[in-house]
Amino acid sequence: MVVAIAVVCILAVLGLYLLGTAQRLDRLHARVDAAGAAFDAQLRRRSAAVLSFVAAVSLDPVLVESLLDAARDAQHVPGLGHDREVVEHGVTRALGWIVAKAPESLANRSAAASELHDEALRASFARSFYNDAIRDALVVRDRRIVRWLGLAGHAPHPAYFEMDDEELPVSKI
């Protein structure tokens, strides 16, 4: 009798632990989805800021063309998959060329330059939040008990988003 009660208690505790773990994993996946949506929106705002920057500042036509192409491509790629990483690398690379070839265009006090700097900085923060949410979800998903019992269900395996986060120059004042 005592053994049966002990077994029932152990199974109840184990069941509560598994239920709590599954609920936590569900909340972490929801957090990844929310952070991903915010990150996607921020990347689109960064692309829009690039387009308004190009319209407001006079630059070398070759630089303008590469920046416009990269920003337009970034606005049309859905999701946060590998294709989006490649396109966002292109935007960052084009911004790097602007920094190298015409740093004064970004370091001036124009509203477009400061908006571009702010949006690029926010995109960097959003990427950090997104990757942090993914890290937290993967920590729970990688537990043996979660893998053995399939507590993650059919949720897709989240993947980190890699992107260059170069700091854009701003005026010192």
Image: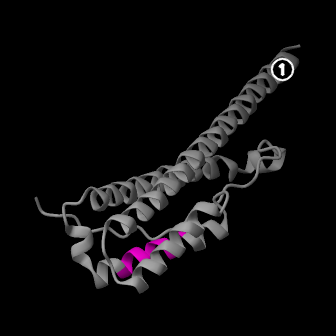
Judged from this view, the residue extending furthest toward the top is: 1
Spot occupied by residue 125 in the image (x, y as percentages of width and height): 41, 53
Q: Position of 96 compared to 152: left or right?
A: left
| 133 in magenta | no
Q: Position of 118 compared to 76: left or right?
A: left
User: For mark 1, what is the residue?
Assistant: 8
The kind of residue on which mark 1 rests is Val
Label 1: element kind: helix
Q: Main secondary structure of the magenta part?
A: helix
Q: Residue at x 25, y 77 (%)?
A: 103
- Whether residue 97 is situated above or below residue 16 in the rendered picture: below
Spot occupied by residue 111 in the image (x, y as percentages of width and height): 27, 55
Query: Between residues 10 and 72, which one lies in front from this camera angle?
Result: 72
Judged from this view, the residue extending furthest toward the left is: 173
- Whether residue 61 is situated above or below residue 167 in the rendered picture: below
Quadrant housing residue 16: top right
Q: Residue at x 66, y 69 (%)?
A: 82
| 89 in magenta | yes
Q: Quadrant of the C terminus?
A: bottom left
Q: Position of 138 compared to 59: left or right?
A: right
- Whether residue 160 is visible here, answered yes or no, is no
- Whether residue 68 is visible here, answered yes or no, is yes
- Whether residue 64 is situated above or below residue 119 in the rendered picture: below
Query: Between residues 158 and 77, which one lies in front from this camera angle?
Result: 77
Q: Please name the colour scheme applied to the rendered image.
A: one colour
- Total tally of numbered discs in the picture: 1
Q: Quadrant of the N terminus?
A: top right
Spot occupied by residue 142 in the image (x, y as percentages of width and height): 68, 53
Please give the range of residues in magenta: 88-97
